[in-house]
Image: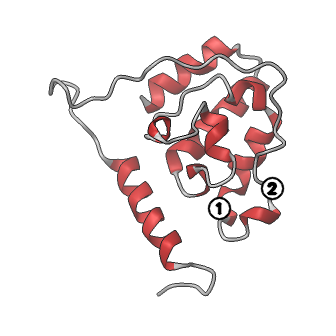
């Protein structure tokens, strides 16, 4: 059953996000695999001031580690294109957008996975180009 903190909207969005995360499209079927698109250039002076805080994620405690990771690397996250479909949303610029306001990262396992992978690779000393390649290989 539902926990008292699980709203109907959160449950439905979670179901849709989970479904998107597991849908596999055959690469051999022309037109079915979306083109990854270009990664954006990080905007000068970008910071994490719009990334939701842990307190703002009370309804999504499982997302807190991903938000904490992205909060450490806003300039890197701003140079990565998300592969879950966020790029089609109004107001989207980069993976960083997924973590701001009503961004999908609150419920989307792809957004969360990309953010955590980017932070780990950055911590290991990888360049933005190397991080983009790793994210494309895993999520595109």
Residue at x 27% of width, y 29% of height:
33
The outermost residue toward the left is: 29
Residue 130: x and y in percent read: 62, 14
Residue at x 35% of width, y 55% of height:
19
In this rendering, position of residue 82 left or right of residue 140:
right
**Quick check: marks 1 and 2 in contact, CB under 8 Å?**
no
Q: Secondary structure at mark 2?
A: loop
Image position of 53 with respect to 26: above or below: below
Residue at x 59% of width, y 19% of height:
40
Residue 122: x and y in percent read: 74, 24
Q: Which residue is mark 2?
A: 53
Q: Which residue is mark 1?
A: 62
Mark 2: few, some, or many residues within 10 Å (few <14, many ≥20)? some
In the rendered structure, find residue 11 and report the number of the disc placed on it. none
Res 4 quadrant in image:
bottom right
Q: Secondary structure at mark 1?
A: helix
């Amino acid at each position: 059953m539902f926990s008292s903190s699980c709203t109907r909207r959160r449950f439905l969005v979670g179901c849709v996000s989970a479904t998107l995360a597991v849908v596999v499209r055959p690469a051999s079927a022309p037109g079915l695999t979306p083109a990854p698109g270009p990664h954006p250039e990080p905007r000068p002076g970008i910071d994490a001031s719009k990334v939701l805080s842990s307190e703002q994620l009370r309804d999504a405690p499982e997302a807190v580690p991903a938000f904490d990771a992205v909060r450490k690397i806003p300039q890197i996250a701003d140079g990565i294109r998300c592969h879950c479909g966020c790029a089609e949303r109004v107001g989207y610029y980069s993976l960083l957008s997924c973590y701001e306001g009503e961004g999908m990262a609150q419920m989307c396992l792809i957004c969360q996975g990309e953010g955590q992978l980017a932070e780990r690779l950055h911590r290991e000393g990888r360049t933005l180009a190397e991080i983009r390649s790793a994210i494309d290989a895993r999520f595109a």
